[in-house]
Amino acid sequence: MAAQTRRNTLVDIAAEAGVSVSAVSKVLNGRTDVAADTRTRIAGLLRQHGYRVASRLGFGVVDLLIGSLYSPWAEELLRGTVEAANEAETSVVVTTVHSAGEFTGWLDQATARGTAGALCVLHLPGSRELQRLAAARIPLVVIDPPTEPGDDIRSVGTTNWQGAMTATRHLIELGHRRIAIISGPAGLWASRARLDGYRAAMQAAGLVPDETLIRREAFTVAAGRSQTRELLSLPQPPTAVVAGNDSQAFGVLQAVREHGLRVPDDLSVVGFDDVPVASWAAPPLTTVRQPLAAMAATALRMLRSDPATAAGEPRHIELATMLIVRESTAPPPT
């Protein structure tokens, strides 16, 4: 914009915010010597008028919002984000967000300091949050959305249904018929898709899934262990288990050892994710490779693209899964 027009706009913004033009200029240029509440108010007005507010953390900053940092799954997402950000000469700010309230807290901070955009893992912002993001001109991409996103949200996921179907079909081809599944929480989109993939493979093979072999639990080692204890105590225990993720699968391995049994001699096990430690398990884990690092990198590239000019691009991208066969699966015991 022309210098005089720009000056006039800054004067208008200063008047609307009830501050001096100098204060507006400081916020525009990323200065921090303005009170936090005032800075937030001015930054919002600047963005509404089409200005790109400099971050006090420096240029090229994106935010990664994730529920927990303490798992191999999270480590892979972090690795993918950081590697892609390095290639784009961008810095990453990581914040743990477990709830809508914590998302709002992060949004207050991000609006005050500025950000080039947010990658949000397993949290789908509500309409009010989306309105605030739009007003602050903060683009968003959701990684592994917990529910199916609408057309107003860009997201990256993986072929959960296909992955679980392939894992179950692998066990069927080995000769297993009593195949259990420990699915994830019922409210998660990925959990439902994996359970549907399991059912599809069983039905395609002419097998009726035994409902006593279908379990829903958290994606944790403890959940996999407790559910497997129950499965092995059934009058007719399964000969194979499809776990909802690798952490659950590690719990399955623990429970099998507690019962004095062996994998895969007595029970075959398939995980989901293929985190690096899956190949270090005893025995090395057969699992469905979910391209976690690539999902994060793809999300970052989507974030850096201009949504206003991406009318022909997909709003949701699914990356392919792949079955990695190792030593935790074999034909059922005779």
Image: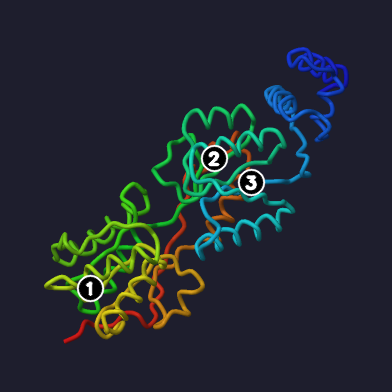
Residue type pointed to by label 3: Asp
Label 3 Cα neighbours within 10 Å, binned few <14 / some 14-19 / many ≥20: many
Q: Which residue is mark 3?
A: 63
Does label 2 or label 1 sit earlier along the sequence?
A: 2
Frontmost residue, 307 versus 78? 78
| Residue at the (76%, 17%) spot, across then down | 13
Does label 2 or label 3 sit earlier along the sequence?
A: 3
Compared across the picture, whether 16 is left or right of 5 comes to: left
Q: What scheme was used to colour the molecule?
A: rainbow
Compared across the picture, whether 13 is left or right of 304 comes to: right
Identity of the residue furthest to the front in this view:
258
What's the mark number on residue 102? Answer: 2
* Secondary structure of the residue carrying numbered label 1: helix
Q: Nearer the viewer, mark 2 or mark 3?
A: 2
Residue type pointed to by label 2: Glu
Residue 283 in the image, given as x and y percentages of width and height: 39, 83
